[in-house]
């Protein structure tokens, strides 16, 4: 069984006027449309 909890440290990217977080490709198969996930954002540095 694979883990169901992941910790990802990312810089916020910019896409036009929106700030986005890109999910790593390794999680692509685990994150399907319609899947309910919980995301917590902790600001590490300003």
Image (cartoon, rainbow, N blue to C red):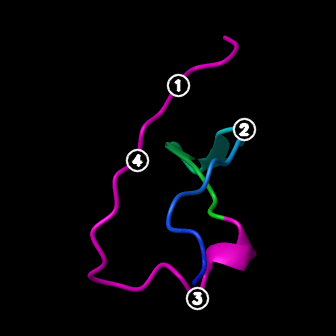
* Quadrant location, the C terminus: top right
The answer to which image quadrant residue 24 occupies is: bottom right
Residue at 66 percent of width and 18 percent of height: 44
Kind of element beneath mark 3 = loop
Kind of element beneath mark 2 = loop
Closest to the camera, between mark 1 and mark 2, is 1
Closest to the camera, between mark 4 and mark 2, is 4
Q: Name the residue tied to disc 3.
A: 29
Distance from the alpha carbon under mark 1 to that under mark 2:
12 Å
Distance from the alpha carbon under mark 3 to that under mark 2:
22 Å
Q: Name the residue tied to disc 2.
A: 11
Lower sequence index among marks 4 and 2? 2
Lower sequence index among marks 1 and 2? 2
Are the residues flagged by discs 4 and 3 in contact, CB closer than 8 Å? no
Residue 18 at what x, y percent from top left?
49, 45
In the displayed structure, would residue 45 be above or below residue 7?
above
Q: Name the residue tied to disc 4.
A: 39
Closest to the camera, between mark 3 and mark 2, is 3
State the residue in front, 16 or 14: 14
Q: Name the residue tied to disc 1.
A: 42
Crowdedness of circle 2 by 10 Å Cα count: few (<14), some, many (20+)?
few
Crowdedness of circle 1 by 10 Å Cα count: few (<14), some, many (20+)?
few
Lower sequence index among marks 3 and 2? 2
Magenta stretch contains residue 10: no
Magenta span? 24-46
Lower sequence index among marks 4 and 3? 3
Crowdedness of circle 4 by 10 Å Cα count: few (<14), some, many (20+)?
few
Distance from the alpha carbon under mark 4 to that under mark 2:
15 Å
* Quadrant location, the N terminus: bottom right
């Amino acid at each position: 069984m694979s883990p169901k909890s992941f910790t990802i440290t990312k810089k916020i990217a910019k896409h036009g006027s929106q700030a986005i977080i890109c999910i790593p490709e390794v999680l692509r198969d685990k994150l399907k449309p319609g899947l309910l996930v919980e995301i917590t954002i902790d600001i590490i540095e300003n």
